[in-house]
Image (cartoon, rainbow, N blue to C red):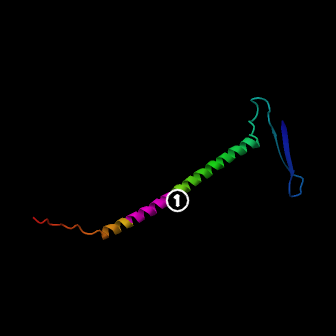
Amino acid sequence: MSWAFTVPNAGGNQKFFSFSANVGLGVGVGTHGVPDGGPAVVLLGIGLWVIEFIRRKVRRRACQQKQIEALTAVVQKVSAQLEATKPAPQVVAENP
């Protein structure tokens, strides 16, 4: 199979741009074909879905990490307050 592409020059003179090619269609001859739209679109959709899935997981982990850090800060603050208000140990003497 052969094809040609010819376009006149936009300047108005008689020069043309031309391109042509010969493509073999026999088994083992020429180039391999490009997949049709169906499988290509399916693979593209799967790839985009995987990227979005990973993006959501990363966002969720980042959000959970922020929540863990905030809760850790609250626990440390409450722990420090409890230590500050904890009464000093008292020694009780026994009566003989």
Would residue 23 appear left or right of 78 to someone viewing this image?
A: right
In this view of the protein, which residue sits in the foreground, 81 or 43?
81
> How many numbered discs sit on the rendered protein?
1
Occupied quadrant, residue 43: top right
Q: Residue at position x 21%, y 68% from top?
A: 90
Instruction: Say if the magenta span includes residue 22.
Output: no
**Quick one: SS at disc 1?**
helix
Q: Residue at position x 40%, y 63% from top?
A: 75
In this view of the protein, which residue sits in the foreground, 15 or 28?
28
In this view of the protein, which residue sits in the foreground, 42 or 26?
42
For residue 81, above or below residue 20 = below
Q: Main secondary structure of the magenta part?
A: helix
| Residue located beneath label 1 in the image | 63
Occupied quadrant, residue 56: bottom right
CA neighbours of label 1 inside 10 A, class few (<14), some (14 to 19), many (20+): few
Furthest toward the front, the residue is 96
Q: Which residues are magenta?
A: 63-76
Q: Position of residue 49 (x, y in %)?
A: 64, 49
Q: Residue at position x 60%, y 51% from top?
A: 53
What type is the residue that disc 1 sits on?
A: Cys
For residue 95, above or below residue 24 = below
Instruction: Say if the magenta span includes residue 66.
Output: yes
Q: Position of residue 77 (x, y in %)?
A: 38, 67
Occupied quadrant, residue 72: bottom left
Q: Residue at position x 75%, y 37% from top?
A: 33
Q: Position of residue 88 (x, y in %)?
A: 24, 69
Q: Position of residue 24 (x, y in %)?
A: 79, 33
